[in-house]
Amino acid sequence: QVQVAESGGGLVQAGGSLRLSCSASGRDFTIYRTNWYRQGPGKQRELVAAIVSGGDTEYSDSVKDRFTIFRDNVPNTVYLQMNSLKPDDTAVYLCNVLAAATTGPVYDYWGQGTQVTVSS
């Protein structure tokens, strides 16, 4: 079992920046892919950024060149750096981890989400 927790959301003015963190914990697991989704009020859930174990990344057109997904030296933690924020970026941001136990299948694990609100 893998637990996923997001942090770093908050209220920011348009043009500002926030950094979200996604931390996965558990015993003896391997993460294959980490996705950041968001769901704004009245909108469908949207995949905004992803990073795979080899380091390749992908972004939705709506956040490309403004958001950066990356890992650093903290194990099993992925960050989403969000710059030049717009009111349209207001949403609950959810981290989704695809991981497997040492000899098991890959499962989806989700965090509870963190609210990002961008004021105009």
Image (spheres, grey):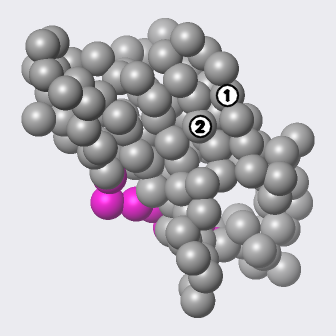
The reply to whether the magenta stretch includes residue 49 is no
Q: Nearer the viewer, residue 61 or 85?
A: 61
Relative to 27, 91 lies left or right: right
What residue is at 28 percent from the left and 45 percent from the top?
Answer: 109
Can residue 30 be seen here? The reply is: yes
* N-terminal label among 1 and 2: 2
Numbered circle sitting on residue 50? 2
Q: For numbered disc 2, what is the local secondary structure?
A: strand
The extreme front residue here reads 105
Which residue range is magenta in the image? 111-117
Q: Quadrant of the C terminus?
A: bottom right
Q: CA distance from mark 1 to mark 2?
A: 5 Å
Q: Quadrant of the N terminus?
A: top left
Relative to 13, 27 lies left or right: left
What residue is at 58 percent from the left and 89 percent from the top?
Answer: 42
Q: Is residue 93 above or below residue 52?
A: below
Q: Is residue 4 above or below residue 44?
A: above
Q: Are marks 1 and 2 in contact (CB under 8 Å)?
A: yes
Q: Is residue 34 above or below residue 95?
A: above
The residue that mark 1 highlights is 57
What residue is at 67 percent from the left and 28 percent from the top?
Answer: 57
Amino acid type shown at disc 1:
Thr
Amino acid type shown at disc 2:
Ala
